[in-house]
Image (cartoon, coloured by chain):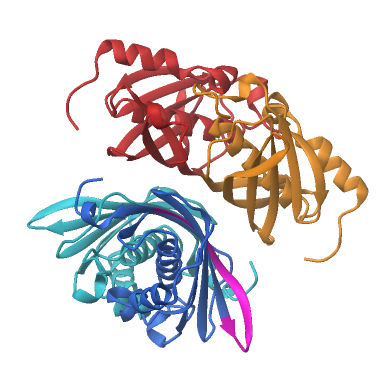
Chain colours: A red, B orange, C cyan, D blue
């Protein structure tokens, strides 16, 4: 619950955040602290849905992935993080120019870690809470990642 | 609970399914029936995460969007569908060549509609259930879509 | 988001809170403000489960019901509140002498209202967060309560 | 997924089901098979809420506890089951004379087990699905139950 993470670890996690599907979605790390992770995406037309709103899938992906990286800040470097499940409520439609997501660990653990993610819509210089998720994660030692769990 | 949807409506929903973020993610409609919608995606490297598994965000986006289109099959044409919330459990890591998602409406309604989505991983010719979601949706008349709800 | 509720309304909701199953479970209202409701229960042997911990069902019932009454503080008196769904994470086993639950509305609405409930375990004079829920509620006019919705 | 459970184990779990809060709520085991558990409750006035419907907390308690006992049928006898989280959707108000709950394991595991519970309302001789839950459980060896996990 206590010690800060090293600058090297924070920088590594910030870089590591944007790979594969997350890079494809243009989500980027912004702030990394122990038990906390913030990410951001500038909205392009391909992030929207049929009615012009930002797609729920973008917010869900951001909420999940940012929670996962918040969990990474609380475990030793040889552990990987898997999402067991998450639940997300969409509080109001998002239609702005960018999204910011802030994830906080609300329960640390050697195996089970629980995070909350808040996704806010940035439009016309103001920020509005658009979605909130609760995410259950599991820390798995790198050597056991392929096992059946 | 009864009448089938017209071929025109089914064809329209199948086309309409792949727009914006969903087109960007290459998800495509497969089968459309009243209260049921099936979609599919061929997995590319940009759908994966840092460990090579298919990203949870792809499965969540697919589960949400396919549930939404299953809901579209149960409401009049002048209604739009919004996701209120969803919860998704990841049952086992997915690493195959394609995903298929099947969404079923388990509670119809004039306003509140509830769907289940199952996402299966296709690898080496066999199909394995990888994730399951429960999705709460709201039908909103097109003319009221911009209101505060 | 604005006006406070009247003392009469607060007192009515506090009394109304403990009826039927909630009275049977001995849950009681503690503090009522607009958009906020706090409840409490002194733990008896019949609130525990087979291992001596407080049963998850007690915490879930408390989280749901207290969220519902927080929603009541935001709607006109002729509206009833129904739970559409909730999700609850159990952060750590609770084994204390009492539970306190605090519910806050995080999204007001004429129809859809979203609340968060935190259930804390009181043991040896200190309070520990034991469970957290996100609750989706619906306000329904009293005259429409028996309709199909 | 394999062997059936012994008659002794099934009888033990059926008896063990109704202790503490569950006994207080008068929930009773009905059918026990590997990966499946069915329970029942005859509704009394103290199971209802302020509008005469069966309280959501009764259904949530039943969904959670029955899922837990379905999980017990899949693990060795020296393991205990804890609920990590659950989500429940209330599909329609329940007002009948009894509830029946059927829980099925949809993902077995040495640690993480996932179940679905369906709660049906029995009224006038017919059965209607009233609520559905997805439950994430953890198997913990009896000797480690008091540890921080």
Q: Residue at x 49, y 58 (%)?
A: D115
Rendered view: B111 above or below B94: below
Q: Quarter-wise, where is residue B128 in the image?
A: top right
Residue sitting farthest toward the right: B7
Q: Is residue C145 magenta?
A: no
Q: Quadrant of the N terminus of chain A?
A: top left
Q: Is residue D131 magenta?
A: yes
Q: Residue at x 43, y 71 (%)?
A: D62
Task: State which region is magenta.
Answer: D122-137
Q: In this view of the protein, can residue A27 be seen by the observer?
A: yes
The percent coordinates of residue B14 (x first, y second) are: 82, 40
Residue sitting farthest toward the left: C124
- The answer to whether residue A93 is left or right of residue C57 is right
Q: Residue at x 33, y 33 (%)?
A: A104
Rendered view: D8 above or below C88: below
Rendered view: D114 above or below C65: above
The percent coordinates of residue C18 (x first, y second) are: 31, 75
- The answer to whether residue D77 is left or right of residue B31 is left
| Closer to the camera in the image, B31 or C24 | B31
The percent coordinates of residue D91 (x first, y second) are: 58, 65
Q: Quarter-wise, where is residue A101 in the image?
A: top left
């Amino acid at each position: 619950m206590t010690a800060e993470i090293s600058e090297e670890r924070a920088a590594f996690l910030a870089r590591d955040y944007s790979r594969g599907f997350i890079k494809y979605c243009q989500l980027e790390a912004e702030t990394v602290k122990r038990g906390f992770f913030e990410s951001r995406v500038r909205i392009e037309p391909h992030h929207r849905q049929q009615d012009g709103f930002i797609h729920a899938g973008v917010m869900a992906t951001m909420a999940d992935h940012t929670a996962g990286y918040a969990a990474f800040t609380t475990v030793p470097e040889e552990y990987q993080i898997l999402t067991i499940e998450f639940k997300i409520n969409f509080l109001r439609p998002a239609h702005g120019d960018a999204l910011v997501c802030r994830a906080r660990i609300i329960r640390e653990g050697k195996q089970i870690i629980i995070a909350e993610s808040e996704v806010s819509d940035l439009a016309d210089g103001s920020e509005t809470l658009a979605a909130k998720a609760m995410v259950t994660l599991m820390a798995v030692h790198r050597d056991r990642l392929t096992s059946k769990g």
